[in-house]
Image (cartoon, helix red, strand yellow):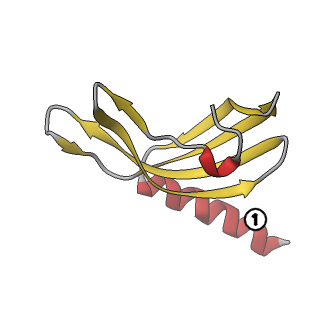
């Protein structure tokens, strides 16, 4: 398990094959509760290539010096990501 936010990842390897490839991450908050936005791709075994970009927001809690996953929200498409951006932008612009 990771002991710093920089070590946290969504990358996952199984049988020597990278099933989930992390493309980028942005640490949104650090501390006892850390929130990270990841950009990643899943391996499509039938096509033998990585699928479209996906996004996930993960929350981790630090206990006994180690970060433990606590919750996640997966953003499954660019269209969904754009809708979230539009909603947040609208709310922020209102205030």
| Left or right, residue 10 beside residue 95 | left
Residue hosting label 1? 91
Q: Where the C terminus falls, by quadrant?
A: bottom right
Q: Nearer the viewer, residue 77 or 18?
A: 18
Q: Where the N terminus falls, by quadrant?
A: top right
Q: Relative to 78, is 7 above or below? A: above
| Left or right, residue 13 beside residue 84 | left
Mark 1, other Cα within 10 Å: few <14 / some 14–19 / many ≥20: few
- In the picture as drawn, the residue positioned furthest to the bottom comes out as 93
State the image quarter where residue 63 is shown: top right
- In the picture as drawn, the residue positioned furthest to the left comes out as 47
Q: Residue at x 71, y 39 (%)?
A: 3
Q: Residue at x 69, y 48 (%)?
A: 5
Q: x and y percent of residue 74 in the render?
A: 53, 40
Q: Nearer the viewer, residue 55 or 29?
A: 29
Q: Relative to 28, is 89 above or below? A: below
Q: x and y percent of residue 49 in the render?
A: 19, 45
Q: Nearer the viewer, residue 15 or 92?
A: 15
Q: Relative to 13, is 87 above or below? A: below
State the image quarter where residue 19 is shown: top left
Q: Relative to 64, is 79 above or below? A: below
Q: x and y percent of residue 44 in the render?
A: 23, 37
| Left or right, residue 62 beside residue 50 | right
Counting the numbered discs, the total is: 1
Q: Residue at x 31, y 51 (%)?
A: 52
Q: Residue at x 76, y 75 (%)?
A: 93
């Amino acid at each position: 398990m990771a002991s710093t936010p920089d070590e946290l990842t969504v990358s996952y390897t199984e049988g020597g094959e990278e099933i989930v490839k992390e493309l980028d991450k942005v640490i949104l908050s650090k501390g006892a509760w850390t929130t990270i936005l990841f950009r990643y791709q899943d391996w499509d075994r039938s096509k033998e290539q990585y699928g479209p970009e996906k996004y996930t927001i993960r929350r981790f809690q630090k206990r006994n010096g180690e970060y433990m996953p606590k919750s996640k929200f997966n953003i499954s498409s660019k269209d969904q990501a754009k809708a979230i951006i539009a909603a947040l932008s609208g709310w922020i612009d209102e205030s």
